[in-house]
Image: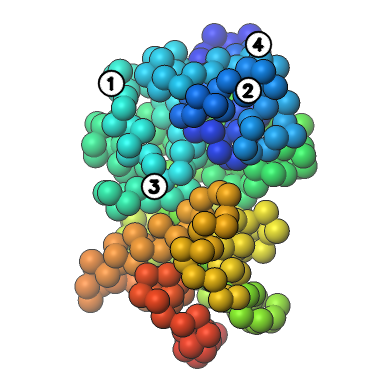
Amino acid sequence: MKKTKHKVAVLGSGSWATAIVKMLTENLDEVGWYVRSAYTKEHFKLHHHNPKYLQQVLFNPEQIKISTDINKIVSYADTVIIAIPSAFVKAELDKITVDLKGKIIFSAVKGIIPETLLILGEHLKKYHDISEKNLGVIAGPCHAEEVAMERLSYLTIGAKRKSVAKQMSDMLGSWFIKTTYSKDVFGIEWAAVLKNVYAIAAGIAHGLGYGDNFQAVLISNAIREMKKFIKKNVDKRKRNIDNSAYLGDLLVTAYSIFSRNRTFGSMIGKGYTVRSAMAEMRMVAEGYYAAESAYKINQDKGDKKAKTPIIDTVYRILYQNAQPKNEFVKLSEKLN
């Protein structure tokens, strides 16, 4: 794969963006990398690693075309992978003045853009006139920390065109990264969003002292709730919710020690306020923003909305100052 003339760039400098750059450097001679912070750029040039995330991953600086100029990096690339936290995506996209229409764009964003209540693929389609055939998504189950340690991990590559997914799979795959293909682009992107909300629920339960038995029932209900939400709010196509992009990604995010959303939820369950928990965490918990957006989107369906007691519970705790203990007592009566 290293002989390809295809140019790929990653937008974002968090842990997931850094992990994706690492995966790409296994196969490509050069990777474009947009980072917002001048400090990150200068530190990288001196020390060859991200100063804030996955510091143990050392890069060959000759492989990395790094810049704080988003238009320079987007212009360079044929394929752009966006791995910016959803709360900041719109502001970064608004900086882009170069034409995006001829490029392949993959979402590695695991959240909803709060300004438009859309996942990235839908936002790009509606506001940037990007054709669905040029959109893709990189989904899990895969934690950045395990990529950094080169532990065997799996990705689901979603795209309408199999050739587009195949090209991305070749660029990301390695001896420690296995990939599978899905046509359900928006479905698996929504699954990547919702699993963060359910991971917060799992964390709250842990913080409140609920045990493994309750967690098993909670996550069993969560995957069924996810299926109902996607069917009502995305499309009614038949999809195997047991696949890794759905159930697998949910499980690892709900249970892993690396899950920032579970950690955030656990802090809430232990009595932290939302503000204090967010202040103490170094990374963005995407599920915080996703809980509000998913709740509002579902409520907009009125009588046709999906039954989502877990999402509703997390929303009330995070946004209406409801008491976690009382909310989970009520939620426990709705699970089966």
**Residue picked out by circle 4:** 62
Q: Residues within 10 Å of mark 2 (few under 14, many from 20)?
A: some
Residue 81 visible, this orientation = no
**Residue picked out by circle 2:** 44
Q: What residue type is labelled 3?
A: Ala
Q: Which amino acid does label 1 sit on?
A: Thr
**Residue picked out by circle 1:** 97
Q: Position of residue 190 (x, y in %)?
A: 43, 53
Q: Which amino acid does label 4 sit on?
A: Glu
Q: What residue type is labelled 2?
A: Phe
Nearer-N-terminus badge (1/2): 2
Q: Which sits in the foreground, 255 or 327? A: 327
Nearer-N-terminus badge (1/4): 4
Which of labels 1 and 2 is toward the front? Answer: 2
Please report the residue visible at 28 percent of the width from the left and 21 percent of the height from the top: 97
Say what secondary structure mark 4 lies in.
Answer: helix
Say what secondary structure mark 2 lies in.
Answer: helix
Nearer-N-terminus badge (2/3): 2
Q: Which label number is shown at residue 87?
A: 3
Indicate the quadrant where residue 319 lies.
bottom left
Q: Which label number is shown at residue 139?
A: none
Callout 3 touching callout 1 (CB < 8 Å) = no
Looking at the image, is 229 positioned above or below residue 157?
Answer: below
Looking at the image, is 287 positioned above or below residue 323?
Answer: above
Q: How crowded is mark 1: few (under 14 residues within 10 Å), some or many (20 or more)?
A: few
Say what secondary structure mark 1 lies in.
Answer: loop
Nearer-N-terminus badge (4/3): 4
Q: Which sits in the foreground, 166 or 89? A: 89
Which of labels 2 and 3 is toward the front? Answer: 2
Please report the residue visible at 77 percent of the width from the left and 39 percent of the height from the top: 149
Q: Where is residue 239 in the image (x, y as percent from the top left)?
A: 47, 56
Q: Where is residue 30 in the image (x, y as percent from the top left)?
A: 60, 14
